[in-house]
Image (cartoon, rainbow, N blue to C red):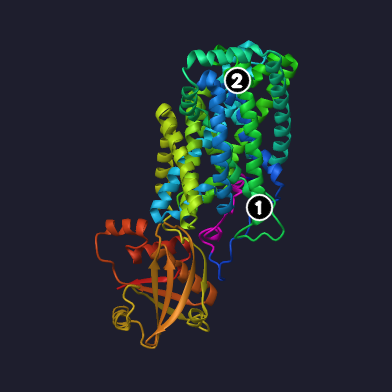
Amino acid sequence: MSTPTTRQHDRHHRLRHWLLQDTEQVPTPAMGTVQPASAIETTPGSPAPEESGHRQSWWKVMCLTGVDYFSTLGYQPGIAALAAGILSPLATIVLVLLTLFGALPVYRRVASESFRGEGSIAMLERLLPAWLGKLFVLALLGFAATDFMITMTLSAADATAHLVENPYVPESWGGHTLLITLLLLTALAAVFLRGFSEAIGIAVLLVGVYLLLNLVVVIVGLVEVITAPVVVTDWTSALTTSYASPWMMVGIALLVFPKLALGLSGFETGVAVMPQIRGDADDRPDHPKGRIRGTRRLLTTAAIIMSAFLITSSLITTFLIPQQEFQSGGQANGRALAYLAHEHLGAAFGTIYDVSTITILWFAGASAMAGLLNLVPRYLPRYGMAPEWTRAVRPLVLVFAFVAFFITWIFDADVDAQSGAYATGVLVLMTSASIAVTLSARRRRHRASTIGFALIAAVFVYTTVVNVIERPDGVRIASLFILGIVVISLISRVRRSFELRVTSISLDATASGFFTGLSGREVRLVAHDPDRPDAQSLGAKERQQRAENHIPAEDPIVFLEVTVIDASDFTTHLDVRGCLRNGRRVLEVVSPVVPNSIAAILLHLRDAYGVRPNVYFEWTEGNPVTNLLRFLFLGEGEFAPVTREVLRRAEPDRSRRPKVHVG
């Protein structure tokens, strides 16, 4: 009969299994398939395999990113009218020009160089060295988190606005917008906790219906404008009355268009979903031309569709909706096209439009959640800056849901209040992408491309700076995300520093020959400074170790040299090369960290060759605290005690644990 303690333990075990059963093993460009740190392969690492899963045609995947991109039509025209007033059409044209001739070329380039779904962040990571690159990536992840998290909360808040403004919904619901928004976010989290395998099929249906309904509203609105030309006359009269010249209108439109940056939201998501796109049968893992071509079609098609809707929706909402209705509390605030659907097509069609808008806005949060679930496991665990459980979907969903609840509560589910933070996240990512492709073009010595992308980058820098100055909330929120990510990352890096941190090990023929046929025997490795590779140094080291540790003269010694490169990397594959220097056997290996690599090699020799490894060190000179910091950030430091601690954690059985000696 089970005891209460046993039943509690079983429930805890089942809960843990449920949370972690879908742990992702994310391929990375540098390392191949990520494995648990304790799994040491005995064969050379192979190139990174392609992501598994059932891929889809590019137009279907466009609908998955489109639930984020196209859903901005639910609130973009209203925000544009609120920001630019009667100049909304002109400001929208500026936005469309930036979309087609700025963002689109940049992200078509990103698709060519970052085709595994890491987006522009991976390009900058490759261009920036060591810790500088890692810290810059953490900052960009903070802005990406701002973008995706605010997408979830803003979309849910706008879905709530469409719901409570519907004439068939009781008026009392209008006093519970925060609660309704939280319920929508809870439903979104529940979908991901249960599974999200049918996302693309659902997205195709939602986007198809939504775009069709918007097309009907736009056509009816244009017909209204054509049949009642007085609205155009009134608009032009208002323009000439308010502004002295066309140049002033253009200038002000250029100044206010950064506030419309929400209309650029879909590009980063577009490259994030690249692994879902079906390529050609002969695509190479290192350059899948079919997938890249499909992604470029996705980006171009989505940009053209969205540009057409942005311009036409801006025109009809400006011409047909009184300006006061766009203000806070107005019937068109955050729902301009829905207002026209009800006014010109009746309550029944308007309700159908509301249902479609609510659904796609809610599902836009799903697209953003998918983006977060794609980014976090690809970077933080690989840096050692997140626990291994962050490779699992469900724990991350719970974390992101909690953050979304908190943001919604802080902003009281207000669409206008969140738009600044949303635009900041979008613009910073697009600015980083434009800078990344500029640096890439310069590295490839393409002068024309470098100049063109540099001009685009300058426009995005201007747009971002203007948005930050006028709406600093976005930077404040992003700063909190960045601070949280950096603090959690550094704590995690410290806690995980004593893992093996090696994915696989391979020995060349010479190195393997040092241990072949020695099964069951003691082998003695002496750690040696690779900066002193001369034969005299090896001889002195051998005499010292034999004397201090009583190593029998008949027992051969193998020297082990670890050269540290890019200590900011966390895990790596080790290629161990063997060589002879004046008759002495030496193993040479390159790694981000010395003690962990030595421990991993000892365990590998034990398991692959059946030997009993011993390693010999000298005590490291210097302050212990300084040596610990050198280990954490430079991969060096106090070798002997750290190597022993890594071995102790990796091998609990003392009888099977390689021995560490210090003289």
Q: Is residue 374 left or right of residue 206?
A: left
Q: Is residue 292 above or below residue 165?
A: below
Q: Is residue 101 above or below residue 169?
A: below
Q: Is residue 530 left or right of residue 282?
A: left
Q: x, y percentage for residue 312? A: 64, 26
Q: Is residue 274 above or below residue 468?
A: below
**Region rendered in magenta:** 13-39
Q: Is residue 649 above or below residue 261?
A: below
Give the crowd class for mark 2: few <14, some 14-19, many >=20 residues within 10 Å.
Answer: many
Look at the image and tell me whether residue 516 can be seen.
yes
- Number of callouts in the render? 2
Q: x, y percentage for residue 472? A: 41, 29
Q: Is residue 586 left or right of residue 222?
A: left
Q: x, y percentage for residue 129? A: 41, 56
For label 2, the SS is helix
Q: Which residue is mark 2?
A: 161
Q: Is residue 17 magenta?
A: yes
- Residue placed most toward the observer, 276 or 258: 258
Q: Which residue is mark 1?
A: 291
Q: Amino acid at mark 2?
A: Ala
Q: Amino acid at mark 1?
A: Arg
Look at the image and tell me whether residue 328 can be seen.
no
